[in-house]
Image: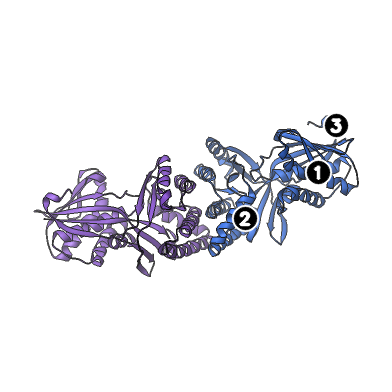
Chain colours: A blue, B purple
């Protein structure tokens, strides 16, 4: 038998950057998922096949041995090794594990790919050993694993990937999950430019050091937008949501995290029927998101593609991590 | 004998749009000038030769007769007719007048071309009739003339064009002129897209009606930037000035007056060494301005040109309206 789990990616709707200082961030689980299949090994290695990401290799203890791809890729996989071992520790088993990782979430563009793979890993490994961990426990173990790579992650990504749905987060006040009926579709435009969250957060900090009062005023407005935006989202007031996305994007641009390409995609989306468009996540590359009425979605999607960028429809999903035991022969289903 | 006068264009450094609601705007006279040469006629017509703008014609009373270009161009020229007649009225003379208009200021992109031509017209006509009007009087007559075209102009453009230098303006508090030693060069990037100030002001008003509290917060921050920006300008603190321009541009984008082309030019300028870049004026087209160290100016200028836009260096100028009497034979000098 094998353990299989899937977990969703996420997008930040409001509050990126401002959440570092104050006010909430609003984050949605999206219907692009990562899948991990876990199987037992006779040795004590954790072997990770991440072929569709372009690399695979195994860990003996903490040490990475590349099989395909460069050795430094081990950095990306270290979280999975750690999460796997923590899960086994929690279930009081000792074993080697094979992990087969498949993800439909674009990597390194702010859509929560790392956390989703990590959450799915915990989900799959616990299933493999007949565990029945609560979502709370899965999220916590994944968080520990992620800490290895990201140093001091906020916990947002593993949390929303585990539980799905709409989540708001405020520093020092933790997470709130919100109910929303039905779904809301968005268009994601991917600049294909990888970005570093850490670097962008530093960019903002430097500008804020030089202009503390002004920047804090802008950050305050962003916090208000996140609060109002959560309200508009839960009421499905798309027109207002669009306005707030547009205003928020301008403020993100004012604190220095937008790029020419992100501007091009946002203006393209608006000119082709979007009610609102903004960068999502750290900025400096990565993705933008657009909101549009159902009838306009296809045109917005096409317009972004004409700008030589990836574009896809995503919907808010309630489905968090899901795991099951499967027969060996079904492993590629 | 003829009367000749020149007057400078202007650029808004800070406070466009926010000045409509509260806080100051900071406006600079720039070293691109309009020139008007006025000569007497035997009839009572005001004949306007604006060949380098593509049209000319004459007024009999208020009625425009096109000689070159479409009849509706009379709308643009009506202010000059009115200012000419008001100037003669003030000097207690009756005559026809020939006006030869030449301008180095791009039209309809927010650089104060209309006001400069109008101020130069008053300056030239009063010289023609041996007047010696104060700048105050010239500005006031030009303002009356402009009211014909613009309905309810702020008075900013005729004021800064008449007096030159740095001016701050706040609704209900009038104008303040500021001394600055030496000059500061800027790069102007012209999208070549004409825009309507009225339309853009309405766009902001509509968005504000839907989101009053948020928009007022953003407008407040823009007001603070204008105050801080005036201080940074007078201290010639270029680095801080650049930061403030960048932040201000993002806020203008957040209230919906930026365009893809303006974003492209601002990001291009910053990527090529500018300390700051922002749209100037109403937005929705028109111009952006960039600030850079002397050594970087040429590269910023070239980079904007590579984006298929006009680009030119302009400097803050102390020279307001200047007039003199000239011999007929020097009229083309």
In this figure, which residue is indicated by the disc labeled 3?
A: A328
B61 relative to A315, above or below: below
Q: Is residue A88 left or right of residue B115?
A: right
Pick out the residue farthest to the left: B42
Pair 1/3: label in front: 1
Q: Which chain contains the residue that carries disc 3?
A: A
Q: Which structural element holds mark 3? A: helix
Residue A100 or residue A317, whichever sits in front: A100
Q: Which structural element holds mark 1? A: loop
Rounded to the nearest whole Å, what is the CA distance between mark 3 and mark 2? 43 Å
Where's residue A7, x and y in %? 75, 43
Quadrant, the N terminus of chain B: bottom left
Q: Residues within 10 Å of mark 1 (few under 14, many from 20)?
A: few
Where's residue B193, x and y in %? 38, 45
Where's residue B131, x and y in %? 15, 64
Mark 1 or mark 3: whose residue is earlier in sequence: 1
A213 relative to B73, above or below: below
In this figure, which residue is indicated by the disc labeled 1?
A: A62
Q: Which chain contains the residue that carries disc 2?
A: A
Could you say which disc has been placed on residue A15 in the image? 2
Q: Residue at x 27, y 51 (%)?
A: B76
């Amino acid at each position: 038998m094998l353990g299989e789990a899937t977990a969703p990616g996420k997008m930040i709707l409001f509050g990126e950057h401002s959440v570092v200082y104050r006010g909430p961030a609003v984050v949605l689980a999206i219907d692009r998922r990562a899948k991990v299949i876990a199987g037992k090994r006779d040795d004590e290695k954790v072997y990770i096949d991440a072929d569709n990401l372009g690399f695979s290799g195994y860990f003996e203890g903490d040490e990475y041995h590349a099989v395909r791809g460069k050795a430094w890729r081990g950095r990306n996989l270290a979280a999975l090794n750690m999460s796997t071992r923590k899960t086994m520790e929690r279930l009081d088993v000792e074993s080697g594990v094979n992990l087969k990782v498949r993800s439909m979430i674009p990597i390194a563009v702010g859509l929560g790919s790392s956390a989703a793979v990590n959450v799915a890993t915990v989900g799959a490994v616990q299933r493999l050993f007949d565990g029945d961990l609560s979502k709370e426990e899965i999220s916590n173990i994944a968080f520990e694993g992620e800490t290895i790579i990201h140093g001091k992650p906020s916990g947002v990504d593993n949390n929303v990937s585990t539980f799905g749905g709409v989540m708001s987060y405020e520093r020092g006040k933790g997470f709130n999950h919100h109910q929303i009926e039905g779904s809301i579709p968005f268009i994601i435009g991917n600049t294909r430019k990888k970005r570093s969250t850490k670097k962008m957060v530093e960019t903002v900090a430097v500008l804020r050091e030089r202009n503390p009062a002004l920047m804090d005023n802008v950050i305050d407005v962003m916090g208000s937008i996140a609060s109002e935006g959560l309200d508009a989202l839960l009421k499905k007031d798309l027109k207002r949501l669009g306005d707030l996305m547009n205003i928020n994007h301008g403020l993100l641009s004012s604190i220095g995290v937008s790029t020419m390409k992100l501007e091009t995609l946002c203006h393209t989306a608006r000119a082709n029927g979007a009610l609102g468009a903004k960068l999502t996540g750290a900025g400096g590359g990565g993705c933008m998101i657009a909101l549009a009425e159902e009838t306009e979605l296809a045109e917005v999607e096409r317009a972004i593609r004409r700008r030589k960028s990836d574009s896809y429809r995503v919907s808010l999903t309630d489905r968090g991590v899901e795991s099951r035991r499967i027969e060996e022969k079904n492993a590629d289903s």
